Image (tube, rainbow, N blue to C red):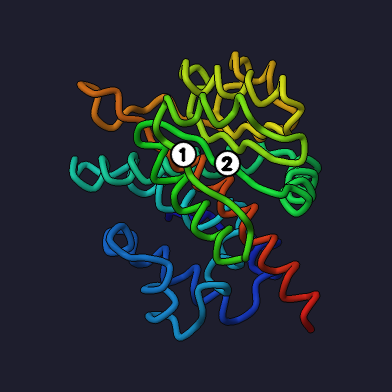
Amino acid sequence: MIINLNQDIIENLTKTEYEIVKFINNNQEKLQELSIVDIAFETFSSPATVSRAIRKCGINGFNELRHKLTSQNRNNEIHNVGEIINKSLIEARNSIEHISLANVLKIIDKIKKSSRIYVLSRGLTEYVADEFTLKLQLLNFNVVSIKDPNIMKIKTKNMKADEMVFIFSLNGETQELLESAKNANERGACVVTCCCNSSSSILQYTDLSLIAYKHSHVAIKEFEVSSRLPLYIISRIIIDYMVSESENENR
């Protein structure tokens, strides 16, 4: 059995939860290819109930259960997919745990008070910055995304104290971003950095920062292409909170 049951666990489960655990234990081979939605469908329950039943049995959610299953599988394809999914899970979970909630609130407050926001990024991180910029624009903020090294260096040399530079950088060591952060800092503008390196050089010029977790896994090693998932998570947390706050104010 993939989930070991004892009398205490059984007594703590509802009838539906017990049937879910029975289904999981009786369909171990089939389970490796199912999602939590599939299990809910097969047991006439809901994904939330499936997750709750698994947690009551001492397993930290469906992803941990799936990783436990795939790690035991002799099918290399299933095993490899399981390992890849687990890397994303580790990166997402650790990123959320690393993020300072106090800094999130301080950053949002600075965004609201800034007359203009420049979002700076380079390389693949530009996709994160563009999405973040668009969503802030949709929320009616005066914000622009800058990717060109020369433009960002010129703009930051002429910033005002009530403006903000918002930098997305995986390692925080890109030279043009470092120079731009230094320029903005010297002009008295607020500098916010979102990166995955707690010892990054750019932090010396940063007023507020959010440091996420980057897995050591590199998807395409030839080009050193790393996941930007941690930066997307930071972006989503900020935007989602601002949207929820706006909705509450309009009620």
- CB under 8 Å between discs 2 and 1: yes
Looking at the rendered structure, the kind of residue marked 2 is Tyr
Q: 129 and 226: which one is in front? A: 129
Looking at the image, residue 147 sits to the left or right of residue 109; the answer is: left
Q: Is residue 75 above or below residue 57?
A: above
Q: In this view, does 26 lie above or below 200?
A: below
Measured from the top left, where is residue 74 in percent x and y? 21, 41
Picture quarter with the C terminus = bottom right
Measured from the top left, where is residue 113 in percent x and y? 78, 50
Q: 178 and 39: which one is in front? A: 178
| Residue bearing mark 2 | 118
* SS state under label 2: strand
- Residue 146, numbered circle: 1
Looking at the image, residue 70 sits to the left or right of residue 236; the answer is: left
Q: Label 2: how many residues lie within 10 Å, few (<14), some (14-19) or many (20+)?
A: many
> Which residue is at a point 60% across and 81% down the rendered structure image?
15
Measured from the top left, where is residue 164 in percent x and y? 68, 39
Q: In this view, does 42 lie above or below 154?
A: below
Looking at the rendered structure, the kind of residue marked 1 is Ile
Q: Label 1: how many residues lie within 10 Å, few (<14), some (14-19) or many (20+)?
A: many
CA gap, disc 2 and disc 1: 7 Å
> Which residue is at a point 76% across and 41% down the rendered structure image?
162
The quadrant holding residue 191 is top right
